[in-house]
Image (cartoon, rainbow, N blue to C red):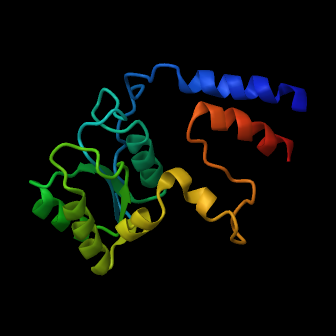
């Protein structure tokens, strides 16, 4: 099936260039459980090109609903520097925080202030995923590449920084 490699690479490039959907397909937050195991907040920022018509990332509400389905109270919460004290208080009352934002890309958000707040929340015993120190040391774009030599990594992991590197490296990855 190696003869299909170029066609698969071209199809992947074509899919990535399709316009993004403008809505979250009617996804609404489910009812919270009556006796939850605890609370997990999905933290995001307003704005950015990764949001649906409802203002949330397209995966935020589905993540919350999956957690609700597992017996947790979960909801999205927006962060800005102005709202930092109130957001920090809500996060410290939760069991966990899932971050759904790209570092340093939102109006009204100072990355160092957000990171300091998240460090304080984590220090209070709340699980923060991903902790800002992890994010700083291992960016999401090439995290798998950085761990490819560990026992849990995959030796053929590769970061595609442009179309040319994708076309050059992807066929080798599929062939191995």
Q: Residue at x 37, y 22 (%)?
A: 22
Q: Which of these two is toward me, 150 or 40?
A: 150
Question: Quadrant of the image for the N terminus?
Answer: top right
Q: Is residue 29 visible?
A: yes
Residue 30: quarter of image: top left
Residue 128, relative to residue 143: is it above or below? below
- Left or right: where does residue 90 sit relative to residue 168? left
- Near-viewer residue (150 or 120): 150
Residue 93 visible in the picture: no
Number of residue marks: 0
At 37% from the left edge and 50% from the top edge, which residue is drawn?
100
Res 114 → quadrant: bottom left
Residue 6 location (% of width, % of height): 78, 26
Q: Position of residue 44 (x, y in %)?
A: 30, 49
15 lies left or right of 40: right
Asked where in the image residue 165 lies, by quadrant, the reply is top right
Decide which of 160, 38 is in the foreground and name it: 160
Residue 89 at x, y percent in the picture: 16, 67
Which residue occupies 19% across, 65% down?
A: 88
Residue that extends furthest to the left in the rendered view of this protein = 82
Residue 86 lies, in percent from the top left, at: 12, 61
């Amino acid at each position: 099936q190696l003869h299909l490699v170029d066609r698969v690479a071209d199809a992947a490039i074509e899919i990535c260039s399709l316009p993004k959907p403008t809505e979250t397909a009617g996804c609404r937050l489910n009812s919270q459980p009556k006796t939850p195991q605890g609370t997990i907040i999905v933290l995001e920022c307003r704005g950015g090109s990764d949001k649906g018509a409802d203002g949330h990332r397209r995966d935020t509400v589905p993540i919350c609903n999956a957690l609700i389905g597992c017996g947790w109270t979960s909801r999205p919460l927006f962060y800005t520097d102005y709202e930092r004290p109130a957001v920090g208080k809500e996060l410290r009352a939760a069991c966990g925080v899932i971050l759904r934002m790209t570092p340093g890309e939102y109006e009204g958000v100072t990355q160092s202030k957000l990171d300091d707040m998240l460090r304080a929340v984590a220090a209070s015993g709340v699980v923060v995923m991903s902790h800002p120190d992890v994010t700083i040391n291992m960016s999401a774009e090439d995290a798998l590449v950085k761990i490819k030599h560990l026992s849990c990594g995959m030796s053929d992991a590769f970061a595609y920084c442009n179309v040319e590197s994708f076309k050059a490296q992807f066929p080798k990855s599929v062939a191995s």
